[in-house]
Amino acid sequence: MLLAVTIFTWSATAGRSDNIQNSEVPQAPGGKRKLIGIVVEETKVGVGIPVGIVVPHSPAEKAGIKAGDIITKLDGESMVATSSSDFIRRLAQKDVHTLEVESKDGAIRTTQIGMVNELDLKPLLNLGKIDVGQTAPDFEAAPSADAPRIKLSDLRGRPVLILFTASWCGPCRLEAPKIKTLHEQYKDRVRFISVYLDDAKLDVFAYARGLGVDWPISTDGKGLKNTVAKSYGVIAVPSYVLVGRNGNILNLGTVIDSDLAPLLDHALR
């Protein structure tokens, strides 16, 4: 981020987010993140910062930025040799930026863009596809590549915490120990499923085991076009959807800076 996505401007980065620290996430008063509303893809040397997804109604969309554009300059400084994670860190330094953007047809334009509070960008998580009270879209997951698959609908009777994540998402890796501890506390009462927005090049199950993930995983090798993520409208990672015992959605949001334990306790009442 795409959720997703971690659009880490901050949302989901569809590229590398190596060594991103929590202190480097743009923050608004109250500890909330500030965003411009794009998913930046993995950078290619000598190109710039590729835009993968633009969040509807975001500052980026209002500024005319489109998926497929390349950000070539940030505040007058070339981004051609800059990594996606460095670009994100530079965004955190102030609230208003001037971007030079190259479109697919080669046209170059300059636009000014301001960052907004995460809470003011409601479509960030799910683009309106799901909401609290609705039945959670069904999908399959498995604890290992060769294990029998289970359906979300088969787990009714217990709350289910669905975690949308990715190997390329730096904040997802930072949140992994917290999620592991949460699982240890609730594993006998709440089912966990992680949905990985990675491409087919990665052995997701091996990667997840390295993080201590011992609960079911869903992945289809389609990256940001992950089928489950699309059905939930997720474009930002790390994010979560909490499903109640009856299969209806109880809560959803970003994992970063979230205290999920009270939500799980409420789901268990």
Image: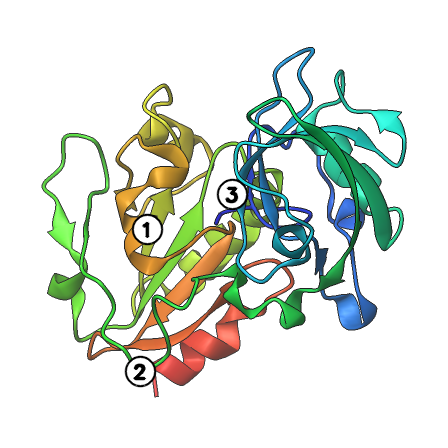
Q: Secondary structure at mark 3?
A: strand
- Relative to 248, say whether 258 is above or below: above
Q: Secondary structure at mark 2?
A: loop
Q: Which residue is mark 1?
A: 230
Report whether 12 appears left or right of 244.
right
- Relative to 117, say whether 100 is above or below: above
Number of numbered discs on residues = 3
Q: Amino acid at mark 3?
A: Ile
Q: Residue at x 56, y 29 (%)?
A: 15
Residue 90 picture location, percent across and down: 83, 38
Q: Which residue is mark 2?
A: 133
Report whether 149 appears left or right of 174.
left
Nearer to the camera, 247 or 148: 247
Cα separation, mark 1 vs mark 3, equals 13 Å
Report whether 6 appears left or right of 234.
right
State which tag comes first along the sequence, 1 or 2: 2
- Mark 1 and mark 2 residues within 8 Å of each other at the beta carbon: no
Nearer to us: label 2 or label 3: 3
Q: Is residue 37 visible?
A: yes
Nearer to the camera, 193 or 241: 241
Q: Secondary structure at mark 1?
A: helix
Q: Amino acid at mark 1?
A: Lys
Q: Quadrant of residue 161?
A: bottom left
Q: Which residue is mark 3?
A: 53
